[in-house]
Image: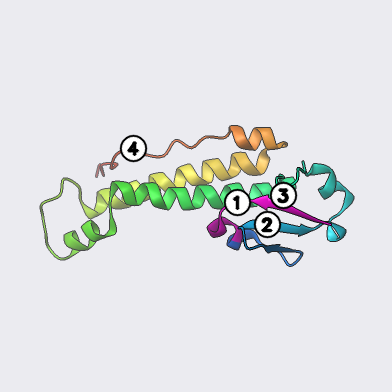
């Protein structure tokens, strides 16, 4: 018996194990014969729906927040603007130091989220975790 779970390929590639594969529709396919009773008990299985075991969900959620942190940072400060500043262009209202402080703010928020996820005991606790990404460039004070 196989269990199918839909999620995004870019996240699955980070957490795929040998007892799993991705089918043509983009579902994670678990060979249920290789899952433990505990893992099977944690799955909520429908015809083509399911929830991965908690350790797998932890890995998926951490990977999702990691990708989201990079995406949100690039929305604030695209890489081409950083390169333009390095090349001497001065038309932006932030500096390379501001970029560094902003990156550190995203890193700090990611590790806060990661800690909450790793300490969560249930899927509901994990799903309730929400990020508080910076919404503007953090100004370097120094």
Q: Secondary structure at mark 2?
A: strand
Image quarter of residue 45? top right
| Marked residue nearer the N-terminal end (1 or 3) | 1
Distance between mark 4 and mark 2 Cα atoms: 33 Å
Q: To which residue does mark 4 refer?
A: 135
The residue at 86%/47% (across/down) is 38
Q: Secondary structure at mark 4?
A: loop
Image quarter of residue 129? top right
Q: Which mark is residue 55?
A: 3
In the image, which is nearer the foreground, mark 4 or mark 2?
2
Q: CB under 8 Å between callouts 1 and 2?
A: yes
Q: Secondary structure at mark 1?
A: loop
Q: Which residues are magenta?
A: 1-12
Q: To which residue does mark 1 refer?
A: 7
Distance between mark 1 and mark 3 Cα atoms: 16 Å
Q: Nearer the viewer, residue 58 or 46?
A: 46
């Amino acid at each position: 018996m196989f269990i199918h779970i839909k999620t995004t390929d870019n996240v699955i590639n980070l957490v795929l194990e040998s007892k799993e594969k991705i089918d043509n529709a983009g579902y994670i396919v678990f060979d249920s014969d290789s899952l433990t009773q505990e893992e099977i008990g944690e799955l909520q299985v429908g015809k083509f729906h399911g929830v991965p075991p908690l350790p797998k969900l932890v890995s998926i959620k951490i990977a999702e927040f990691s990708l989201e942190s990079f995406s949100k940072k690039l929305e604030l400060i695209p890489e081409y603007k950083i390169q333009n500043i390095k090349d001497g262009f001065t038309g932006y209202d932030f500096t390379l130091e501001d970029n560094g402080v902003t990156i550190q703010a995203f890193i700090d928020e990611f590790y806060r989220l990661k800690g909450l996820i790793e300490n969560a005991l249930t899927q509901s606790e994990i799903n309730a975790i929400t990020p508080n990404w910076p919404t503007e460039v953090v100004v370097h004070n120094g």
